[in-house]
């Protein structure tokens, strides 16, 4: 088993799910999990079931909605899609993330010995 | 912003649609699993391998399900609901325990809620129908109208000020309704009365100086309930006429719903302006608005914002002193602090001072707290005993992975359920008792505003306290029983060996506390009962009451002028005495036979003619002519005044003849002859004309009180109606008296007609009521202590089973074993008793001290009988309560006790 999954900031997984749905359109849980694994290189999810906690959270906030549909192999499946609010949240979340990474980047790459006397 | 609201709503929805969501999630997981399996198969795995890999990849479905439930619903709420269900099931399984626990709790909470209802009814509840009653204060002593006007116009401490006289009785009939006049109470009010109290009319208007000038047309305002009950809630009631004291008066308005006047212990249903004609209200006779001697107006103030009662009192005190100086009046009625003005809180049912209120709340609060803590200790003991019986169950559940917090939550939930069930039962019981009329409270068509029936406040507080108590008495046992030594608990077969036996453990602490609290309660209640008994004398009023009738007439309320009224009252006893079958008739003061100790007045006499005057305190009572003869009392020396004396008296007479009783003769004149001697009260001089054998100037007064009996003067009779006392021969009854009064004048209303026996019985009832309450509290303490002690001892025997078995196997005999168990119980009983007695001594001291400063009760000290009797009884009963279960120790079979190891 992969021993060290990335220790993620709270809400990071939610942002990934929003982005995935925004990029691929309506998708069921399996699809979302697989896509995140593909893109992240299997470093995010402890197991694919973890995704459902995030899906419940996003639904409760009204950022995604769920509908029952039929999957490619003809099974009943729940399809999640981004709502308008969710799209707004994705923009806000992305901006916030950019700010954090930029700030962290600056702090962590500062040079040694440049302090005030 | 509203996201969290949306989340809560969504979670709540999830709780409701739980089953459907569970199914959906199962479907979703199945689909996910199959998709994964197919993907692995596509990658070349066998079906079984692919399946296993898929489960690994997805996570354990059961765990995911649980997590999903927690995320989408309200896990805490659902767990609590589960615990609640579990608690109900467990309690249903052990019915005996549940019944005992709920009964204990019901008794304890019922008693507390009963006591609290009384406190609520008398001192906590605000008077109904008024705006912000907490800002209302009143002057303790009545003043003249000029003083009131000065307060109203020149004081800045109040935002509004009003004056009133009352409660005053009125004879009222609705004109045109054909009903007989009835006697109801009302207030005579200044125009500011309603606005000061913040009352609005539901119909019509209130009074104002422009519409209702002095001596103008007679107008009245009625209460909303009078309007409903006597005017059929007539929408055009404003403008209808009433007959008030025999005069026509127009209704101008109906007051706010529930409003029964200020301080509605005696409810006011009629409001008459102080500008009214004296014919409508005799209290207003003699131009009281301008009379500088008529200190009859009670002053109400609504404190201005941020003004405290103390500041208002100081300001009014200063203002009153100035007024006194201007009017050349020396005010002798200063209290201990040198104040001439005292304020009382006027927003309640009865007037109280903040100190009295604090005293009552603290005193009753203490008793309630004691009872409550006592009940809790008892229940904690019960639950603890049960907890150790469940030791194995709890140990097993802990060892298979139940979290301690969850177990504790379940145990706590059980005790809270028990407590609330008991509390609700207790509240219902208290409601049942208090919803019936209370002896001593006047019952009429227009009942008093003093209501002790538990209201919403009492109910809510009771239930909250029950729940808290449940958590309180459940907590310690829950902590103790979820901390067992797992291994021993599981290994042992004996049902209750989870915890090592501790001599000074929790349960012995409970035992000692129960004993102490029971002792304290029994002693305090005994003290209260003896205080009442001492004030009472059950041997009767000191004369033969058979055939004695009492009734009242108030001719001024029937339209008489003060002079005509006095003349009629002066004639009445003689006319009644001439009716055949009547042995005697006389008049007495309205409260002549009341059970309140009489007020004493200072008089001075010369012990021997020519000596310096000495001051004595005696009870001054006004009586009608022929008083002693009518009651069958002996005038041992001299004579009492006859009917003639009353009519012939003139107000200028300097020396009024009086009759004194034997204690007064003894106290005032020693062995000398009292006849013909003088007694001085201020400027008034009395001449002793007779000595009577009547030591009980107040009914139920045990000690004899020196009393001086003055005969009513015509002037006295101009102020309201006295009590008429008539003695009739056997079998005559009241009918002839009724027809005689009717013959005198059919307009006269007779009221409060009753036999002397019934009248006195009512006081007896009123005395019995608190006595039985205190008695019930004492009994409750006794019973509960016994149940608790017996339970704890029984449990100790079970716990020490093995120890006892070993001792017996080693040769201990049964009496020795019994002694072993009893020794410990007795020690706890003794320790508890000593603590309880010590507490009671301190509390009684406190009570005596407090009573002395409020004059509330008349306890003096604890009587020896009381200090020895109840404790001995309690200790005896407690020892028996311990002995019965302790006896079981000697039935232990050593072989089986030891085999259990």
Image (tube, coloured by chain):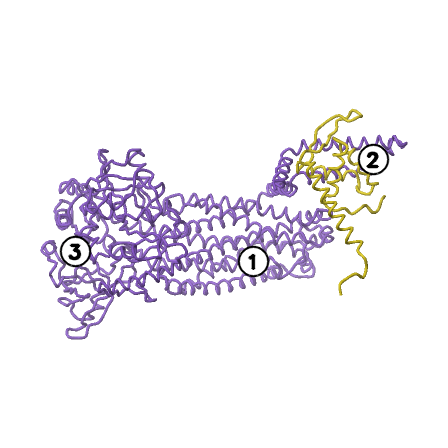
Among the two numbered marks 2 and 1 on one chain, the one whose residue lies closer to the N terminus:
2
Q: Nearer the viewer, residue B547 or B279?
A: B279
- What x and y, as percent, mark residue B887? 59, 55
- What x and y, as percent, mark residue B368? 47, 54
Q: Could you say which disc has been placed on residue B252 in the image?
A: none
In space, the residues marked 2 and 1 are separated at their CA atoms by: 62 Å
Q: Mark 3 packing: few (<14 Cα in 10 Å), some, or many (20+)?
A: many
Q: Secondary structure at mark 3?
A: loop
Q: What colour is chain A? A: yellow
Residue situated furthest right in the rendering: B44
Q: Could you say which disc has been placed on residue B54 in the image?
A: 2
Chain label for disc 3: B
Q: Secondary structure at mark 1?
A: helix
Chain label for disc 1: B
Give the purple chain's letter. Answer: B
Q: Nearer the viewer, residue B521 or B817?
A: B521
Disc 1: which residue: B511
**Residue B723 appearing in the image:** no
**Residue B591 appearing in the image:** yes
In space, the residues marked 3 and 2 are separated at their CA atoms by: 109 Å
Residues at marks 2 and 1 touching, judged by CB atoms closer than 8 Å:
no
- What x and y, as percent, mark residue B444? 30, 42
- What x and y, as percent, mark residue B468? 55, 50
Disc 3: which residue: B712
Does mark 2 fall on the same chain as mark 3? yes
**Quadrant including the N terminus of chain B:** top right
**Foreground: disc 2 or disc 1:** 2
The picture quadrant where one finds residue B234 is top left
**Foreground: disc 3 or disc 1:** 3
């Amino acid at each position: 088993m992969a021993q060290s999954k990335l220790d993620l900031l709270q809400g990071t997984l939610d942002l990934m799910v929003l982005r995935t749905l925004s990029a691929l359109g309506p998708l069921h849980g399996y699809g979302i999990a697989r896509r995140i694994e593909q893109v992240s290189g299997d470093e995010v999810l402890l197991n694919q079931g973890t995704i459902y906690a995030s899906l419940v959270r996003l639904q409760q906030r009204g950022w995604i909605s769920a509908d029952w549909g039929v999957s490619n192999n003809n099974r009943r499946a729940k399809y999640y899609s981004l709502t308008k609010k969710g799209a707004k949240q994705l923009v806000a979340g992305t901006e916030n993330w950019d700010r954090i990474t930029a700030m962290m980047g600056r702090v962590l790459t500062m040079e040694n010995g440049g302090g005030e006397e | 912003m509203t996201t969290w609201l949306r989340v809560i709503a969504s979670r709540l929805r999830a709780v409701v649609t739980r089953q459907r969501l569970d199914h959906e999630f199962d479907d979703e997981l199945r689909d996910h699993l199959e998709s994964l399996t197919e993907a692995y198969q596509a990658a070349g795995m066998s079906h079984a391998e692919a399946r296993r890999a898929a489960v690994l990849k997805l996570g354990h479905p059961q765990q995911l399900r649980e997590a999903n439930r927690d995320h989408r619903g309200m896990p805490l709420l659902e767990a609590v609901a589960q615990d609640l269900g579990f608690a109900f099931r467990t309690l249903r399984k052990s019915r005996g325990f549940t019944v005992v626990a709920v009964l204990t709790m019901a008794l304890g909470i019922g008693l507390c809620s009963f006591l609290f209802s009384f406190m609520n009814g008398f001192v906590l509840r605000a008077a109904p129908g008024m705006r912000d009653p907490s800002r209302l204060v009143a002057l303790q002593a009545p003043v003249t109208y000029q003083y009131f006007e000065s307060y109203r116009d020149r004081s800045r401490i109040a935002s509004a000020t009003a004056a009133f006289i009352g409660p005053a009785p009125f004879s009222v009939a609705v004109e045109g309704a054909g009903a007989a006049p009835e006697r109801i109470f009302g207030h005579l009010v200044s125009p500011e009365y309603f606005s000061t109290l913040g009352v609005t009319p539901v119909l019509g208007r209130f009074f104002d100086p422009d519409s209702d000038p002095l001596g103008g047309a007679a107008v009245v305002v009625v209460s909303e309930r009078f309007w409903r009950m006597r005017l059929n809630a007539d929408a055009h009631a404003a403008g209808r006429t009433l007959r008030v004291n025999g005069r026509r008066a127009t209704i101008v308005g109906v007051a706010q719903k529930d409003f029964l006047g200020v301080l509605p212990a005696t409810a006011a249903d009629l409001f008459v302006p102080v500008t009214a004609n004296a014919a409508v209200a005799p209290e207003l006779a003699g131009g009281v608005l301008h009379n500088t001697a008529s200190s009859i107006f009670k002053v109400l103030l609504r404190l201005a914002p941020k003004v405290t009662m103390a500041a208002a009192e100081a300001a009014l005190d200063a203002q009153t002193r100035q007024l006194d100086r201007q009017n050349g009046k020396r005010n002798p009625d200063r209290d201990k602090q040198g104040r001439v003005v005292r304020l009382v809180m006027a927003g309640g049912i009865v007037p109280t001072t903040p100190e009295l209120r604090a005293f009552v709340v603290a005193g009753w609060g203490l008793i309630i707290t004691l009872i409550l803590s006592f009940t809790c200790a008892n229940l904690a003991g019960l639950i603890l005993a049960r907890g150790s019986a469940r030791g194995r169950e709890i140990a097993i559940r802990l060892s298979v992975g139940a979290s301690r917090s969850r177990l504790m939550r379940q145990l706590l939930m059980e005790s809270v359920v028990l407590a609330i069930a008991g509390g609700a039962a207790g509240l219902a019981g208290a409601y049942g008792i208090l919803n019936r009329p209370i002896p001593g409270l006047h019952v009429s068509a227009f009942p008093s505003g003093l209501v002790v029936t538990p209201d919403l406040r009492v109910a809510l507080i009771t239930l909250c306290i029950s729940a808290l108590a449940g958590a309180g008495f459940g907590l310690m046992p829950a902590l103790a029983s979820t901390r067992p030594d797992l291994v021993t608990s599981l290994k042992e077969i004996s049902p209750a060996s989870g915890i090592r036996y501790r001599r000074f453990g929790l349960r012995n602490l409970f035992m000692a506390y129960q004993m102490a609290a029971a002792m304290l309660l029994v002693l305090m209640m005994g003290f209260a009962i003896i205080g009442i008994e001492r004030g009472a004398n059950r041997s009767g009023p000191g004369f033969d009451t058979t055939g004695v009738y009492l009734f009242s007439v108030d001719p001024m309320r029937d339209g008489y002028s003060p002079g005509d009224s006095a003349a009629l009252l002066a004639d009445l006893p003689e006319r009644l005495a001439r009716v055949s079958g009547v042995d005697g008739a006389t008049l007495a003061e309205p409260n002549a036979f009341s059970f309140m100790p009489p007020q004493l007045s200072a008089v001075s006499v010369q012990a021997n003619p020519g000596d310096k005057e000495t001051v004595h305190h005696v009870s001054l009572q006004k009586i009608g002519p022929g008083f002693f003869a009518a009651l069958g009392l002996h005038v041992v020396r001299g004579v009492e005044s006859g009917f003639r004396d009353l009519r012939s008296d003139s107000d200028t007479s300097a020396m009024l003849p009086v009759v004194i009783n034997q204690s007064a003769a003894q106290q005032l004149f020693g062995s000398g002859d009292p006849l013909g001697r003088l007694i001085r009260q201020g400027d008034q001089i009395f001449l002793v004309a007779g000595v009577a054998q009547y030591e009980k100037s107040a009914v139920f007064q045990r000690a004899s009180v020196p009393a001086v009996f003055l005969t009513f003067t015509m002037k006295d009779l101009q102020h309201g109606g006295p009590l008429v006392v008539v003695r009739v021969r056997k079998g005559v009854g009241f009918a002839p008296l009724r027809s005689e009064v009717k013959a005198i004048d059919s307009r006269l209303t007779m009221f409060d007609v009753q036999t002397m026996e019934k009248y006195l019985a009512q006081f007896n009832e009123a005395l019995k009521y608190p006595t039985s309450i205190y008695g019930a509290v004492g009994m409750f303490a006794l019973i509960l202590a016994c149940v608790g002690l017996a339970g704890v001892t029984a449990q100790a025997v079970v716990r020490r089973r093995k120890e006892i078995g070993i001792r017996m196997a080693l040769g201990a005999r049964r009496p020795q074993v019994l002694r072993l168990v009893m020794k410990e119980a007795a020690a706890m009983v003794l320790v508890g008793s000593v603590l309880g007695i010590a507490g009671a001594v301190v509390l009684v001291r406190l009570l005596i001290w407090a009573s002395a400063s409020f004059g509330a009760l008349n306890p003096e000290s604890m009587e020896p009988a009381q200090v020895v009797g109840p404790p001995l009884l309690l200790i005896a009963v407690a020892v028996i309560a311990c002995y019965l279960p302790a006896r079981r120790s000697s039935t232990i079979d050593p072989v089986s006790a030891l085999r259990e190891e």
